[in-house]
Amino acid sequence: MPHFPWLSLALVALWVAVPAPAIAIDAPAALATLKAEADAGNAEAALQLAEKLDKGVGVVQDREAATAYYRQAARQGLLAAEVPLGVRLVAGIGVAADPAEGLVWLRRAANRGDADGQYELGQIYAHGHDVPQDLREALVWYERAASQGHLMAAFDMGLLYETGQGVAADMRRAVEWYERAARQGESNAQARLGDLYILGAPDIPPNRPEALRWLRLAAEQGDLSVQYSLGQALDEDGHHHEAYPWFLKAADSGHALAQYRVAVMLEEGEGVAQDLASACFWYELLELREFPDGTQRLARLKSRLSAREQAGAKLKAERWLESRGE
């Protein structure tokens, strides 16, 4: 099944007045003026206030009030309010969940050409959430959104073509969609291209330089698993000095396999200056996290360190875990 992080969508508005909710504004004149304009029926002001309330920007966060203002703006025909309202109705954010009404608002936005609305509608059909699952219909809405530059829609188009869901499997088309999203910085698409070019696929021969290029772009956006994958690919190619920093980035953020590889490289001086005390820290950390692979290496390494060095490495590992709430 493709990557479908969904929320939900809505419309069926009963065009009646919405009582202005009482909210606590903790900023002065500008927000007070914005609220007054929204309560007087200004749709743009209602939308702006909804966004601030939703995120707690300059005002106490209040998602119930935010949803009410989104509804006010949507009922006045403001396209930009229809998708947020639909999503909140489907998911029950700041309002009792009403997927049927949410779907109406999302479909309304999608039919008016809103790319986010088209994407969310595609998600609804892809998951079969409150409608019969229909991957062909999902594909229609994804393609409409992607044609307007919606990156996740382009990525999901790639997944549908790769897996043959709702359409005949076609790896070339899948790669075309992935590349459309990846060229605009979508990290999931960059990572998927990296994986495909590492191993190859039907009609897609392996291409190591291209794989490394896409993996590097995705890794630079902070994805731990991709940082590890890039380090692994460079490591396999013998570029240990280039692999080590990527393993270390992932290790510092908690990727256990990366932590193990960093420990081994420090112990053996592979791609980095040998540092037994630092290697001991990473092995101790893995031991505390109940990661089994480093247990024997830790036991052997301790025989090469003083009691003070061992104690220091263990204390550092304990503090590392405490600092992350583990």
Image (cartoon, rainbow, N blue to C red):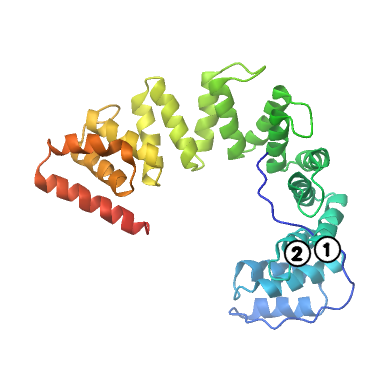
Vertical arrangement, residue 184 with respect to residue 68, above or below: above
**Direction from residue 325 to residue 80 in the image, left or right:** right
Q: Quadrant of residue 236?
A: top left
- Neighbour tally class for label 2: few under 14, some 14-19, many 20 plus, Cα within 10 Å: many
Residue visible at 50% across and 26% down? 212
According to the image, label 2 marks what residue? 89
Judged from the image, the secondary structure of the residue bearing numbered disc 2 is helix
**Direction from residue 273 to residue 103 in the image, left or right:** right
Q: CA distance from mark 1 to mark 2?
A: 7 Å
Extreme residue toward the right, this view: 15
Q: Residue type at mark 2: give it.
A: Leu
According to the image, label 1 marks what residue? 101
Q: Quadrant of the N terminus?
A: top right
Name the spot of residue 70 as percent of width and height, x first: 76, 68
Residue visible at 59% across and 38% down? 188
Question: Residue 67's mark?
Answer: none
- Neighbour tally class for label 1: few under 14, some 14-19, many 20 plus, Cα within 10 Å: some
Residue visible at 69% across and 51% down? 6
